[in-house]
Amino acid sequence: MRLAGFGLALALALVGGGGLGLLAGPGPTPQAEPPGPAGPAVPAATSTPAGGPDVSGLAVSEDGYTLDVRATPARADTPGELAFRIVGPGGAPVTAFTPTHDEPLHLIVVRRDQSGFQHLHPAMGPDGTWRITTSLAPGDHRVFADFAPDGRTEAMTLGRDIAVGGLYSPTPLPPPSTTATTADGYTVTLTGALVPGTASPVTLSVSRNGAPVTDLQPYLAAYGHLVALRTGDLAYLHVHPTGSPGDGRTPAGPAVEFLAEVPSAGPYRLYLDFAHDGVVRTAEFTVVATAGAGTPVAGVPTTSSGHGESGAPHGH
């Protein structure tokens, strides 16, 4: 009876406590911490990202190689040092590279909104640290190191984000266009369509003040150097030239031809570097790859259709 009485008293106490809680109302709602500074907005991809044999730059490490960023510019819009190493499978910095397109390493830097594209060629010190001075706008930037360490038959691209402090003002993705104009009177016209899952021929024709440019200068072993980045995840796509200067069949303009293999439908940003009158210029395009025959299912790797005719480990 004493145990039964104790149980009854405990039950009444619990009910009473609940009733008092209901009478008193709910407790104070925890206040959320104030949000931190907003980071750069990442444009939404129009399709689920898919991989493929020609997609790279999404990983900081691959096959034992790691992109190790050591220093970034301290202030926005102010020249500062960007330094990094390629750490090899054994944990030591890599110091031996096979040149691809006339350089041992290509460094691509672009802000997450796909503005501020830079194609740089830093210098490597004896300790394997690459250094270059550059200026970056506020926001998150993607750094791509494109290289071929000695002993590998294929080049590789590693990517890593770096942050630059300051007031971030995102640049909207420019609408799709088949023409791009530089500040000094060059116009580049794009012909060809990107079809996911196939090696799509893309031609970029250069003119100046309305006249075709037929004396383009070689730049990185080609009359043009093309980088393609997928909007959203900034997957780095290898784009391969179909010829090279001095091969007896590739004219020095106005048309520069490439094979571009994209893995999925949606928008891409193309950056063409070309040289004329001793100056390297960049023309930028937004291109939308449309679904068609051979479009891969999201997440299913595509089958490579060939890597062009340049003969180098890879092109851009």
Image (tube, helix red, strand yellow):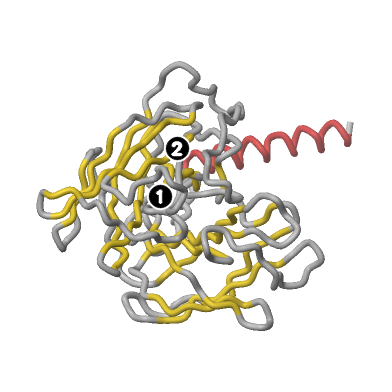
Q: Secondary structure at mark 2?
A: strand
**Residue at far front of view:** 248
Q: Position of 47 compared to 148: left or right?
A: left
Binning the other alpha carbons within 10 Å of mark 2 as few (below 14), some (14 to 19) or many (20 upward) gives many
Numbered disc 1: secondary structure: strand
Q: Quadrant of residue 241?
A: top left
Q: Residue 216: image x %, image y %?
A: 30, 56
Image mark for residue 226: 1
Question: Is the residue 91 above or below the residue 19 in the image?
Answer: below
102 or 73, nearer to the observer: 102
- The residue shown at (61%, 50%) is 313
Residue type at mark 1 is Leu
Question: Would you place residue 301 above or below residue 71 in this image?
Answer: above
Q: How much space separates mark 2 and mark 1, taking CA atoms? A: 9 Å
- Residue found at x 58% / y 66%: 104
Tell me whether the residue at label 2 lies in contact with that at label 1, contact meaning CB atoms closer than 8 angstroms: yes
Q: Residue furthest top?
A: 293
Tell me, for residue 9, which label it has, or none: none
Q: Quadrant of residue 120?
A: bottom left
Q: Residue at x 70, y 70 (%)?
A: 96
Q: Relative to the observer, which residue lies in front, 171 or 166?
A: 171
Q: Is residue 35 visible?
A: no
Task: Inspect the image, locate mark 2, and give the three-letter code of the amino acid beneath it.
Answer: Ala
**In the displayed structure image, the side of residue 151 where residue 242 appears, left or right:** left
Earlier sequence position, callout 2 versus callout 1: 1
The number of numbered discs placed on residues in the rendered structure image is 2
Visible residue check, residue 210: yes
Disc 2 target residue: 260
Percent position of residue 118, x then y? 38, 63
Give the quarter of the figure containing the N terminus: top right
Of the pair 274 and 68, the residue shown nearer to us: 274
